[in-house]
Amino acid sequence: MIDSIKDVAITGGTHGNELTGVHLVKHWLSHPAEVQRDSFSTELHLTNPKANKEVRRYIDQDLNRQFNIEDLKNPELQGYEQQRAKSLDALLGPKENPRIDFIIDMHTTTANMGMSLIFNSSDPLVIGMAFYIKQKMPHATLFYNPSDRLEDNFLTSIGRLNGLLIEVGPIAQGLLNYQVYFDTHTAVMHALDYLQQRNKGLPLNLPAQMEGYQFTKKIPLPENTEGEITAMVHPNLQDKDYHAIKPGDPLFITMAGETIVYEGEQMVYGAFINEAAYYDQNIGLSFMEKINITLQDSNL
Ligand SMILES: [Zn+2]
């Protein structure tokens, strides 16, 4: 039996300085027909208004790390974003028995990651959506991190089937860029069309397997004993998101111009390379592994 979707939420501004999602939500609030489909209802939410107003990623904490079930239940967590997470859980969830079936959360990155479709659920409906969008937008990259929904700390995880995080870049924080806005708009339209077609049992003609990337670890920028960064992303690595990094390839370059190479033994791939938002934790990039993602779904 097809698991039908009745309630969808589209969210923007979870990071307050990522303006694309903020302005798309505002646009759709005044043009709701664009996000309406007759087989489900769509609601629109600006999730971090105070950070939006201040054009900051967050006021007290990163909102998109506050949705783990234990944190939502912890009354001692009272920072602004921790409170926002509890309010959003009440509005869209609650996490253990959500009202909303699926959440589409719109983000941007300063890294050269193009259109990245980030999804943490292994449910065939979610994988199928990513495959569907990639078929329509072949330049998109699938970024797959299967996780337990209750443990997951992303906003999308308070949806019954989790959801999709659309991450588009490169774009500076606090900026709009029409190509990024248009690409995000297009991806959301495909996501809604997919749910509509699936609800109606229409053929989707999706492949059984597609290539993607899976997060392995965050790589810190080199630091001195005071915790200050002593190097930056190497120019050979800058903008090379989703390219291979081989043993011996440059990762960082010190303030004095000395190259620091990758000393691992396995070939890896980079993402979020020189992401401005990660300087608060002195993170230089993420390492990814290339994977094949399989869609096992007798309904498709
Ligand atoms: Zn973001």
Image (cartoon, grey):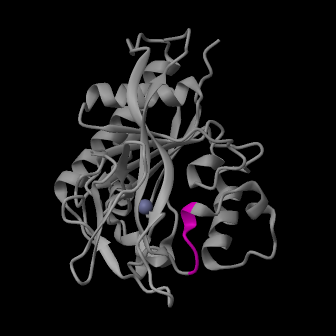
Q: Quadrant of residue 77?
A: bottom right
Q: Is residue 173 magenta?
A: no
Whether 175 is drawn above or below 208: the answer is below
Q: Which residues are magenta?
A: 60-64
Q: Is residue 33 visible?
A: no
Q: Is residue 124 visible?
A: yes
Whether 26 is drawn above or below 193: the answer is below
Quarter of image, ligand 1: bottom left
Relative placement, left or right, of 10 versus 153 is left
Whether 5 is drawn above or below 81: the answer is above
Quadrant housing the N terminus: top right
Viewer-side residue, 27 vs 188: 188
Q: Quadrant of residue 232?
A: bottom left
In the rendering, at what x and y percent does residue 226 appear?
A: 50, 91
Type of secondary structure dominating the magenta stretch: loop
Question: Looking at the image, which residue is at 47% across and 26% down?
Answer: 293
In the rendering, at what x and y percent does residue 16 appear?
A: 43, 71
